[in-house]
């Protein structure tokens, strides 16, 4: 595979004034047939949330989708676990 590997990304959005405590996780995993899957898991912190799996023919397409979703979530206020929420 020619593209760099993506580590799983764990984001969260906490807004106490709106009683909002959400998480969003993205990961890329290989399929049994040589493709790649983008696995998305989201919901309220403390729950299992929902899962969606999108399958792509190659890792490049999966990586591009990963990057797009990460940008959208960060624009909406999600931050990584290592980042401080203010």
Image: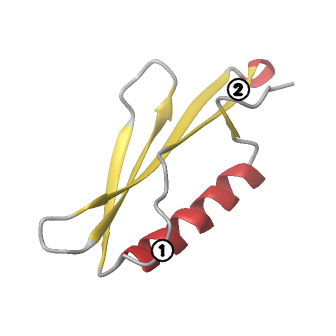
- Whether tag 1 and tag 2 are in contact, CB under 8 A, the answer is no
**Nearer the N terminus, badge 1 or badge 2?**
1
Q: Quadrant of residue 69?
A: bottom right
**As drawn, 14 above or below 25:** above
Q: Is residue 32 above or below residue 39?
A: below
**Neighbours of disc 2 within 10 Å: few (<14), some (14-19), many (20+):** some
**Is residue 58 toward the left or the right of residue 85 in the image?**
left
**Which of 31/70 is in front?**
31
**Can you tell which of label 1 and label 2 is closer to the viewer?**
1
Closer-to-camera residue (29/46)? 29
Q: Count numbered badges in the picture.
A: 2
Quarter of the image with the C terminus is top right
- Left or right: 42 with respect to 1? right
Query: For numbered disc 1, what is the local secondary structure?
Result: loop
Residue at numbered disc 2: 14
Residue drawn at (61%, 68%), measured in percent from left and top?
A: 68
Residue 3, label in figure: 1
Could you classify mark 1 by the number of other residues whose Cα lies within 10 Å: few (under 14), some (14-19), or many (20 or more)?
few
* Image position, residue 50 (x, y; %): 36, 41
Which residue is painted at 29% across and 81% down in the image? 57
- Say which residue appears at 35% left-offset and 28% top-offset: 48
The CA span between labels 1 and 2 is 32 Å
* The quadrant where residue 78 appears: top right
Identify the residue shown where x is 34% and y is 54%.
52
| Image height of 72 relative to 36, above or below | above
Q: Is residue 37 left or right of residue 8?
A: left
Q: Quadrant of the N terminus?
A: bottom left
Point out residue 44 in the picture as x, y percentages from the top left corner. 51, 28
User: In this rendering, would 22 be left or right of 25?
Assistant: right
Report x, y in % for residue 84. 79, 26
Local SS, label 2? strand
Residue 79 percent across, percent down from the top left: 71, 38
């Amino acid at each position: 595979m020619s593209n760099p590997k993506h580590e799983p990304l764990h984001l969260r959005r906490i807004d106490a004034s709106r009683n909002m405590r959400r998480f969003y996780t993205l990961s890329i995993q290989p399929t049994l047939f040589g493709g790649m899957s983008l696995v998305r898991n989201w919901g309220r912190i403390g729950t299992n949330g929902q899962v969606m799996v999108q399958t792509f023919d190659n890792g490049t397409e999966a990586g591009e989708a990963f990057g797009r979703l990460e940008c959208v979530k960060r624009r909406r206020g999600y931050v990584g676990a290592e980042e401080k929420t203010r």
